[in-house]
Amino acid sequence: MTIRRRTTIAAAPVAGAARARSARGTSLAAALVTVLAAGCGSTVAATGTPASPPAEIRPPLAGSLTVPGGTSWAVVDMGGSSATNENFWQLLARPAGTAKWTLATPPGVADNGGLVAASLGGPALVTGFNPSQDLKFSPLATSRDSGARWTPGLLPAGLAAAPSALAAGPGGRLIALTNRGLAETSAPGRTGWTRLASLASLAATPAGRSCGLKSLTAAAFSLSGMPLLAGECASPGVAGIFAYSGGSWHQAGPALPAALAYRRVSVLRLTTARRRTVALLTAAAPGGGASLAAAWASAGGRWALSAPLPLGGARVLSTATGTAAGELSARAASAASPGPVSAAGIVLSTGRAETIADPAGNWQQLPALPAHAAALVLGPGQQISVLAPSGSILTSWRLTRARTHAVIWTKTQVLRVPVPYGSSS
């Protein structure tokens, strides 16, 4: 498979465009200069005092998203040590109807700080670069053909390091969480962003006070198009998901069961696709230990919560949302849940992965993961895959049933990614 060469620029595009080593990288970097000039002249309507984000919650950037009937996307960290800026985050795409992954990382911008992405539906995606080194703002890029071509954009601030820091809604509206605790909103293709909220302003509302809001960790749009913000609550027994309607913010998260009444809850990921909004929540116990739960919201805003999954001291390394979850429960596949199932999954630091597709079902532990497994991919259909990066080599594995009827991981693809070692020094 031929992979196009990608140029990585260590500093801001203004300085880096002259050092670009490919025509595509140079053109995107130059386009970002134009967008930056326009974006810095935009006006922002402040609704609260900017706040430095607390550092307690760090949702993992690695993860995947499969759009029903569309492209599967994955974000993984490849290369070498992040301490020496030898790590390079990569965006992978597997278009609908195909079996192979292709490199889709937009060229021309340093990606050592990480990537976040939001689906625009079908083969369309908007992705943003987290700041690193001398880059103080976040370039954006939009593709409508599964990453073959990209149109540049800009957030004249730094994106928060969270997988749901960027959200796309009806009409292509965007929400971006910044690393200064702000939520900005814009429409695609526009260089002007306006303030939706800040950590301080949201924490001062009645809904924010009841949660004891400590940080913003996720953004999304509801199925009806309402902006959603989510974060970490200091108050126990409250899930901090907030919806903006009628000119104010109100609590929109699920009511928590008695088992989580004394636990502090944080939102790791928030995603809306087709008929459901899916949230992944962590719940920390007062004496230590944590569990994870998945929650699904219907078009009417009603939430259904899964049983908690004890983490046993393990860290969540990546998250996934999609359409598969192993052997789905009868309820999930029945007429009571028409259309594609909205499944969720995680990869843990213990080398195991868990999936769930229905609040009435159970978490399903998958077979022991292959070495270096970093991203679980759910879908299309019942397909479950993992991506395992090691240096500049990316290996794709798929869950299959062997002749012995055992469920095993089968290698399906080995992709050599042109990691530009030394370009960020």
Image (cartoon, grey):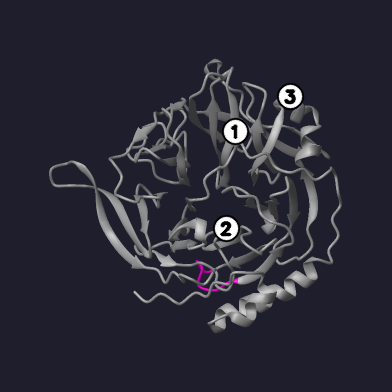
Q: Main secondary structure of the magenta part?
A: loop
Q: Quadrant of the N terminus?
A: bottom left
Of the image marks 2 and 3, the number of the one nearer the N terminus: 2
Q: Which residue is mark 3?
A: 210
Residue 113 circle label: 2
Residue at 35% x, 34% y: name it.
364
Q: Type of residue at label 2?
A: Gly
Residues packed near mark 3 inside 10 Å, few (<14), some (14 to 19) or many (20 plus): some
In this rendering, which labeled residue sits more in front, label 2 or label 1?
Answer: 2
Instruction: Please provide percent x and percent y for residue 302.
Output: 61, 30
Q: Type of residue at label 3?
A: Ser
Mark 2 → mark 1, Cα distance in angstroms: 23 Å
Q: In the orientation shown, which residue stands out farthest toward the left?
A: 404
Q: Secondary structure at mark 3?
A: helix
Q: Is 108 situated left or right of 91 in this image?
A: right
Instruction: Please provide percent x and percent y for residue 360.
Output: 44, 27
Residues packed near mark 2 inside 10 Å, few (<14), some (14 to 19) or many (20 plus): many
Of 1 and 234, nearer the camera is: 234
Residue at 64% x, 64% y: name it.
140
User: Does the magenta-highlighted stretch encompass residue 369?
Assistant: no
Of 274 and 239, nearer the camera is: 239
Residues packed near mark 1 inside 10 Å, few (<14), some (14 to 19) or many (20 plus): many
Q: Quadrant of the C terminus?
A: bottom right
Q: Which residues are magenta?
A: 145-150
Q: Quadrant of residue 132?
A: bottom right
Residue at 58% x, 73% y: name it.
108
Instruction: Please provide percent x and percent y for residue 17.
Output: 64, 79
Mark 2 → mark 3, Cα distance in angstroms: 33 Å
Of 140 and 248, nearer the camera is: 140
Residue 7 circle label: none
